[in-house]
Amino acid sequence: MIYAVNPPLLAPYALQTEQRTEPLGIGERCPRLSWKLGCRRRAAAQSAYRITVAERSADLDTPSRHLWDSGRRDSSDTLLIPWEGPALAAATRYHWRVKVWDETGAAGSSSQSWFETGLLDPADWTAAWVGRDLVTLPHVDPPQDDDPEASAMQSPPLQLRRAFQAPSRPVRARLYATARGVYEPRLNGSRVGDVELPPGWTEYRRRLQYQTYDVTDLITEGPNVLAVTVADGWWSGYVGFDPRRAAEHYGERPAFLGQLAMDFADGSRQVVATGPDWTEQPGAIRSADLLMGQITDGRRHTPGWDAPGPAPAGFWPAAVLDTEPGQLAAEPDHPIRITRDLPAAAVHHREPGRYIVDFGQNLVGRVQLTIRNAERGRRIVLRHAEVLSDGELYVDNLRRAQATDTYIAGGTGTEVFEPQFTVHGFRYAEIDHYPGDLAAGDVTARVLHNDTPWTGNFVCSDATVNQLQSNIAWGQRGNFLAVPTDCPQRDERLGWLADAQIFAPTASRNADVSAFFARWTLDVLDGQDEGGAFRDVAPVMTLDREAAPAWGDAGVIIPWHLWRTYGDLRVLDRSFDAMSAWVEHIRRHNPDLRWRHRTGNSYGDWLQVGVTTPRDVLSTAYFARSTQIVAAAAEVLGRSQEAAHYRRLHAAIRTAFTESYVHADGSIEGGTQTGYLLALAFDLVPEPLLEAAVGHLAVDIEKRNTTLTTGFVGTALLCPVLTDHGRADLAYALLHQDEYPSWGHSIRHGATTIWERWDGWTDHGGFQSAAMNSFNHYSLGSVGDWLFGRVAGIDQTPSSVAYSELLLRPQPGGRLTWAHAEQDTARGHVSCEWHLADGLLTVSCTVPPGVTATLYMPTPDPGSVQEGGDPAAGRPGVLAVEPHPVGAAVRLASGHYAISAVAPDLASMGRP
């Protein structure tokens, strides 16, 4: 959600605890509280705040019942203020209110929120892990001759239940649950919550997340039934491109751990926990795998299995597998949810009973299918694909992932099939053996991803660029599923580190990914070995080897990015030792400071086009960058001696890079676009050679008919470096290019997400190798950060944290006549929009309270800068108007502005 709060008084809004709104079941013993500010008045700022906390909302008005009262604190802080109240109790809700005072000392308004703790200590758990009794099961549920899938599959998912009596309706009830696998809880016949595929995927050997559900309204006086289905998921199913099931890595079979705590009006409490009194029987789901798909047999539905009443026949005692809960952690970020439904855009009848459905958008999720009047036993098969070839599904690029769901009709009239425990990447679905005519209204695509709040928007006057932004956004949705995956459709779906660090700046423009990345960073740190080397992927289920350059550097870059973007000092502090250990690992094995040894798989600039950037140029550049970040992080954390050490090391690496790879004419070893981009972006080119280096880069682009050669690493730097070094014209030319290789090329061929490769499909070559050809892969969409930051113009100064000091640098160019971006930053709503019309450039911008901004107006006439027809200088909130090489620098306090000036000559902008 994008907020635009504009009240007359200074007002706090969007209150968060641990970077989430009203989180249920947090595990942090010292949570941090945040809020954003809005105000209609210019130059508004917070001068003081007061936080009060109570266990009941009504008690916030009664000082004697406050658990914590910070008192009025003279401070402009609004971000991640640590808890200073008494020790938090487990399973307790805390209501909190913040009141603010403005820059004059006048009282602003107040706002309130709440958070609730989960189970904070292992002793809080009384539940035991339960699963299938493998001794009893074969005698209870043998495979049937007419069910070949059931006889050939691994064990079907668990279907567990526990009946219990409640003396009355509770005033409060919470279910704390997790699984070795993925699970769906139910209570008295109703689904519990809306979380998909819990508990998600983490480094299971170190940490298994549990979820907290408010089930107060689902429990009745008298008989109740708590039930759950548990499938293999990431625990024991197929994961990655390892031909073995995850059982070879984590565990052989799924299990469930649950604890239902009910509080009653008389002060009593009842706990129903997993243990020997639970029963189990396989149900209608005969197999379920994240990659392979799900088979559901409608003939085997067991009505009433999850509702009060006698248990259906065939439920036998479940096995108690483990009485220790293990290393559990409360889920700290936004879970996976269904965030939208997409109707069928077209339904194509191929032959009797077989249809191909086009949803018009490459997405990640599953299909919901309504089936009418199918005879009992009819087997309806759904296959999924991202693209078509000659009108049929193209599935070669899925490799081993079958992406096939099957429903065996129960013959009960109208039946609805929607698989719960699998996920596919697709635009098209083939539905085979469907009875009768398939109507568009009978089939829906359901979109799944981590429900990170969407906080950014970019739009401009060019339809192709808008499609590019849409493709970037859909790629992010589809690949932020439990971990930041590389692709959502084939047998891979791993948390590759380089992809994540390259895309993180763009991701945080589109959505609030602070909690998502903070949680995944724990998996990155868990993968580090004793020598300091990170892994290429996290969690480390496969590819357990030292990370490559740009891949392992994510362990340094992402914590720093979370600090710069969200002000998250805790992540930076918790990561610092691992960050410095990574740098020391590189230094130890490369004493000459050229990173040539212990480079892991050394992917280079992955999937660059027609060139090869020397591996040591890329690796040494990243060695320098990571060292520079570690030095800056040490400074922020007050570790001055380490900061000085890493500043010296960075200077030495920079010298080594310059001596080895920067030639006297400003050319970079290898002469590739990526080589120049790395050297320029990471400040590795001596000042006297900058102009020459930029010239070499420009010549290389121009001699290729304004096309790029960059891969994953270089593409993120391409347009920003060109723009920062005076060649915005080339950046725009690349943006508008629609010949291969380019973003426009894929869009011209119907792309609705970012492709993995520039040549995923070409006119001259058709499909690239099916061995590696995803049509939904966010890495090459890293240009999105530039769209927000330089095209529309929202950026921050190098010393700014969480957008405390804005740089508004709109850059007109190309064929655009206007562009607009907005972001709900950690401090509040920011927008920047520009229009070219009638010889004027008009920039409209919003600066949130407590934030300052410098608006750079690209104009040939600094004296023409106006607001509302009057000179901008001296207007309320306009702190100064000063000449600047781009035209004029307008210093702004908070507020909304519309500044105009004589428009720049775009024909000459950016050209030497």
Image (cartoon, rainbow, N blue to C red):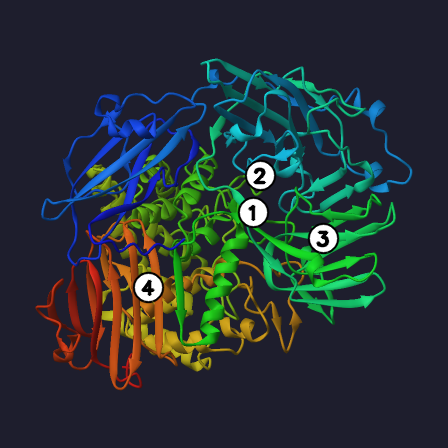
Is the Cβ of the residue at disc 2 closer than 8 Å to that at disc 1? yes
Earlier in the chain: of badge 4 and badge 1, it is 1
Using the image, determine if residue 49 lies above or below residue 393.
above
Tell me the SS state at disc 4: helix
The quarter of the displayed image where residue 534 is located: top left
SS label for mark 1 = loop
Question: In the rendered view, does 185 fall on the left or right side of 557?
Answer: right
* Residue 459 spot, x, y in % from top left: 40, 69
The image quadrant of residue 844 is bottom left
- Which of marks 3 and 2 precedes in the sequence? 3
Q: CA distance from mark 3 to mark 4?
A: 42 Å
C-alpha span from label 2 to label 3: 33 Å
Residue 263 point in image, percent of width and height:
48, 19
Residue wearing tag 1: 494
Question: Is residue 166 positioned above or below 149 on the image?
Answer: above
- Comes first in the chain, label 2 or label 4: 2
Mark 3 or mark 4: whose residue is earlier in sequence: 3
Left or right: where does residue 852 sit relative to residue 295?
Answer: left
Residue at image point 54% right, 63% down: 753
Residue toward you, 34 or 507: 34
3 and 4 marks in contact (CB < 8 Å): no
x, y percentage for residue 89? 37, 20
The nearer-to-camera label among 4 and 1 is 4
Amino acid type of the residue tagged 1 in the rendering: Leu
Q: Which residue is mark 3?
A: 369
Tag 2 secondary structure: loop
- For discs 3 and 1, the disc positioned in front in the rendered view: 3
Rate crowding at label 4 as few (under 14), some (14 to 19) or many (20 or more) other CA atoms within 10 Å: many
Q: Would you name the residue on which mark 2 appears?
A: 541
**The disc label shown at residue 789, or none:** 4
Under mark 4, the amino acid is: Gly
Callout 2, which amino acid? Met
